[in-house]
């Protein structure tokens, strides 16, 4: 496919874990990819180089998604380099960072709700009819208010739930523009930082989830499924893709 005709995807938090896996799966599917990272440029560049090995264009942009100037620079780069955006994967989140929360107790809501809405609003002018937005969340956040929470994770769950609801509130507007919104909710994901952080306050959590749901998905598996959902044009706007244990199982306790 000619490089100028390739679809273009922006993956937030695309330099590691689920985001990196999603990036590489999309590159393999033929998307040119833009990833953003907050720090560790070398790690992001390694993902870019691997994505380029699939014959697509790829670039990494340093960006704190809670910073308006950084977001403006990000979308200026996309406009200049590609001129269009077909897929926005809202993967980056936060709220477990002690230093950032200490500096601003509202940080979880700032990154998981406000920044997600801001990214959506700044992406829309670049997104033609037929584009897709994917919001990546967790079972605990998706079911917030309906299932018991892990105390250390509750601010993240509450704010990610608020972010999801804020995006869903824009669904009529998105539908009118021919843009789909998909929700991808994941169980505890192996080989990511979140289980390690949560084990400190909820020892045995990973084992509990394995006993309840069987083998937990890996970051690579979740990234592949996110990419497949984004590429599957038969999925309607508002569709919720569940990865790992079922939501019904969690609701049943």
Image: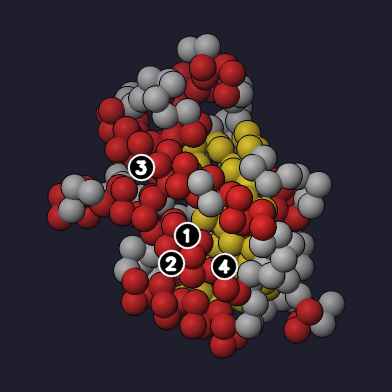
Q: Nearer the viewer, residue 178 or 29?
A: 178
Indicate which disc residue 72 carries: none
In terms of sequence position, does the residue under pointer 3 or pointer 1 come before the other?
1
Q: Are marks 3 and 1 in contact (CB under 8 Å)?
A: no
Residue 63, can we see it?
Answer: yes
Residue 241 location (% of width, % of height): 65, 38
In terms of sequence position, does the residue under pointer 4 or pointer 3 come before the other?
4
Q: Nearer the viewer, residue 94 or 50?
A: 94
Q: Are marks 1 and 2 in contact (CB under 8 Å)?
A: yes
Q: Residue at x 81, y 47 (%)?
A: 234
Q: Are marks 4 and 1 in contact (CB under 8 Å)?
A: no
The answer to whether residue 166 is left or right of residue 106 is right
For label 1, the residue is: 13
Q: Which quadrant holds residue 196?
A: top left
For label 2, the residue is: 37
Indicate which disc residue 124 carries: 4
Q: CA distance from mark 2 to mark 3?
A: 21 Å
Around disc 3, counting alpha carbons within 10 Å, would you say few (fewer than 14), some (14 to 19), or many (20 or more)?
many
Q: Residue at x 32, y 69 (%)?
A: 67
Foreground mark, 4 or 2, reads 4
Q: CA distance from mark 4 to mark 1?
A: 19 Å
User: Callout 4: helix, strand or loop?
Assistant: helix
The answer to whether residue 161 is left or right of residue 125 is left
Q: CA distance from mark 4 to mark 3?
A: 22 Å
Around disc 4, counting alpha carbons within 10 Å, would you say few (fewer than 14), some (14 to 19), or many (20 or more)?
some
């Amino acid at each position: 496919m000619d490089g100028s005709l390739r679809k273009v995807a922006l993956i937030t938090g695309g330099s590691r874990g689920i985001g990196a896996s999603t990036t590489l799966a999309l590159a393999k599917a033929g998307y040119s990819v833009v990833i953003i990272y907050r720090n560790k440029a070398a790690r992001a560049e390694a993902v870019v180089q691997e994505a380029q090995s699939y014959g697509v264009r790829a670039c990494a942009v340093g960006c704190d998604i809670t910073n308006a100037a950084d977001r403006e620079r990000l979308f200026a780069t996309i406009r200049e380099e590609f001129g269009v955006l077909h897929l926005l994967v809202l993967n980056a989140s936060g709220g477990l960072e002690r230093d950032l929360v200490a500096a601003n107790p509202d940080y979880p809501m700032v990154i998981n709700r406000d920044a997600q809405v801001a990214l959506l609003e700044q992406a829309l002018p670049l997104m033609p009819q037929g584009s897709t937005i994917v919001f990546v969340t967790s079972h605990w956040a998706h079911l917030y208010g309906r299932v018991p929470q892990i105390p250390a994770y509750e601010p993240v769950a509450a704010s990610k739930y608020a972010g999801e609801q804020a995006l869903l509130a824009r669904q009529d507007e998105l539908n009118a523009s021919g843009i789909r919104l998909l929700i991808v909710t994941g169980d505890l994901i192996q080989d990511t930082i979140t289980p390690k952080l949560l084990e400190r306050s909820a020892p045995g959590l990973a084992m509990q989830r394995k006993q309840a749901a069987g083998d937990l998905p890996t970051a690579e598996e979740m990234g592949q499924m996110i990419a497949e959902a984004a590429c599957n044009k038969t999925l309607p706007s508002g569709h919720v893709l569940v990865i790992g244990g079922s939501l019904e199982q969690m609701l049943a306790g």
